[in-house]
Amino acid sequence: MDVKTAFLNGELKKEVYVSQPEGFVDPDRSTHVYRLKKALYRLKQAPRAWYDTLSRFLLDNDFSKGAVDPTLFTQKTSKHILLVQMYVDDINFASTDLKACDMFSNEMSLK
């Protein structure tokens, strides 16, 4: 599953300022900068902000973070297991229960 807006939704831990982009420069304040409220593509902090956002969501929904691989999350029930792997802006997932995959896919598409 490709998350098209992955790097646009992450919360930044520190204040980040950017110069006014070409075409959007305020002529009355051409030396001013913008403070970002959320992460942007090509921002150095964007991948980490995305990882933190998705990790928090998964942990809040009874997933466990892998001890060896922090991008691998598992959710176990008495009969089944759901595996979720994060890679850049992709989420790969598999389960021993097809319904769990469908539910996870639907939940992610709502986010």
Image (cartoon, grey):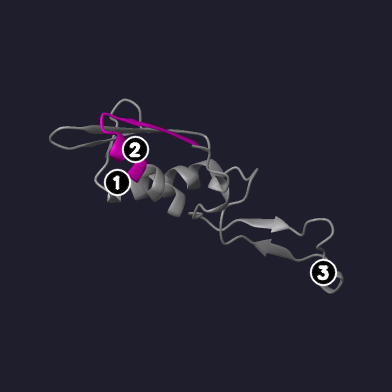
Q: Residues within 10 Å of mark 3 (few under 14, many from 20)?
A: few
Residue 109: image location, x then y, percent: 46, 49
The residue wearing badge 3 is 26
- 1 and 3 marks in contact (CB < 8 Å): no
The residue lying at 83 percent from left, 56 percent from top is 22
Residue 78 picture location, percent across and down:
12, 35
The answer to if 97 sits in the magenta stretch is yes
Secondary structure under the numbered disc 1 in the rendered image:
helix
Measured in 3D between alpha carbons, the distance from the residue under mark 2 to the one under mark 1, in whole angstroms, is 17 Å
Q: Which residues are magenta?
A: 90-103
Neighbourhood count class around disc 2 (C-alpha, 10 Å): few under 14, some 14–19, many 20 upward: some
As helix, strand or loop, the secondary structure at mark 2 comes to helix
User: What x and y, as percent, mark residue 39?
Assistant: 57, 52
| Disc with the residue nearer the chain's start (2 vs 3) | 3
Question: In the drawing, what numbered circle is on residue 59?
Answer: 1
- Taking the view exactly as shown, the residue that stands out farthest to the right is 27
Alpha-carbon distance for marks 2 and 3?
48 Å
Which quadrant, please, contains the C terminus?
A: bottom left
Which numbered marker is on residue 101?
2
**Horizontal side of residue 26 vs 5, given as left or right:** right
Q: Classify residue 76 by image quadrant.
A: top left
| Closer mark to the observer between disc 2 and disc 3 | 2
Q: Nearer the viewer, residue 41 or 95?
A: 95
Question: Which of the two discs, 1 and 3, sits closer to the camera?
Answer: 1
Given the image, on which type of amino acid does mark 2 rest? Cys
Q: Residue at x 36, y 41 (%)?
A: 102
Q: Residue at x 87, y 70 (%)?
A: 27
